[in-house]
Amino acid sequence: MDSAWYALYTRHQHEKVVASLLSGKGFEVFLPLYSTVHRWKDRDKQLSLPLYPGYVFLHDRLEQKLQILMTPGVHSIVGMAGYPEPIPNFEMEAVKRVIDTSWAVAPHPFLHSGDRVRVTHGPLEGIEGILLRKKNTFRLVLSVEMLRKAVAVEVDTSMVEPINSQDCSLIHRELARPLYSVC
């Protein structure tokens, strides 16, 4: 059996601890983080938070499943009918590539509908997602289907093309839509 990416469901706010403990045990883990500013009455603080709250990604064959599940803070390995379900490599590679850029990335609600687009050039070339307009900016929403979670990264509409058989007028129509809508 080849190694695959799996999602580990963690205790609330234990993602960093779980990632550290599993790394210390020799496992390959991926905990994508994003930066945000939290404001309190007396101060502002820059925080580094998990992009997928409650989840840590593990690249493994799951031969040591018990050792993984016995790690403090790990609830379960995400799957179906009690069996761990691997995450498609293209979804994990897309998230990794976005994290490696200097672009602003943030968690985003999972979308069920909307036209899919592909980035045509730049550091995210080839990545597919859903185009979203929020105020005067456009974002590419990347989904991890199994977790029913998504993240969004700002993109220039000149860098994307529709994936379906419709022509580019789809994107140009989007420019005239209201403040918050899905293509």
Image (cartoon, rainbow, N blue to C red):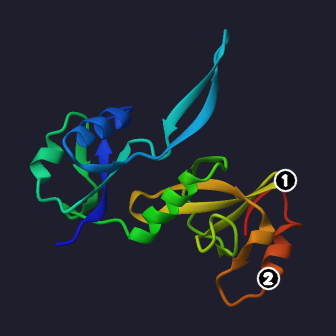
Q: Is residue 74 left or right of residue 119?
A: left
The front one of 109 and 124 is: 124
Residue 120, quarter of the rendered image: bottom right
Q: Position of residue 10 (x, y in %)?
A: 31, 41
Circle 2 packing at 10 Å, graded few (<14), some (14-19), many (20+), is few
Tag 2 residue: 168
Asked if residue 115 is positioned above or below residue 123 in the image, the reply reads: below
Could you tell which of marks 1 and 2 lies nearer the N-terminus? 1
Residue at 11% over, 59% down: 63
- Name the side, left or right, on which 1 lies relative to 178: left
- Residue closest to the far bottom: 165
Characterize the local packing of mark 1: few (<14), some (14-19) or many (20 or more) Cα atoms within 10 angstroms. Answer: few
**Left or right of 49, for residue 71:** left
Where 61 sits versus 15, above or below? below
Closer to the camera in the image, 8 or 112: 8
Task: From this view, report whether residue 108 is shown above or below residue 2.
Answer: above
Q: Which mark is residue 136?
A: 1
Choose top left, top right, bottom left or bottom right for residue 121: bottom right
- Looking at the figure, which quarter contains the C terminus? bottom right
Given the image, on which type of amino acid does mark 1 rest? Asn
Q: Quick one: 14 or 114, which is closer to the camera?
A: 14
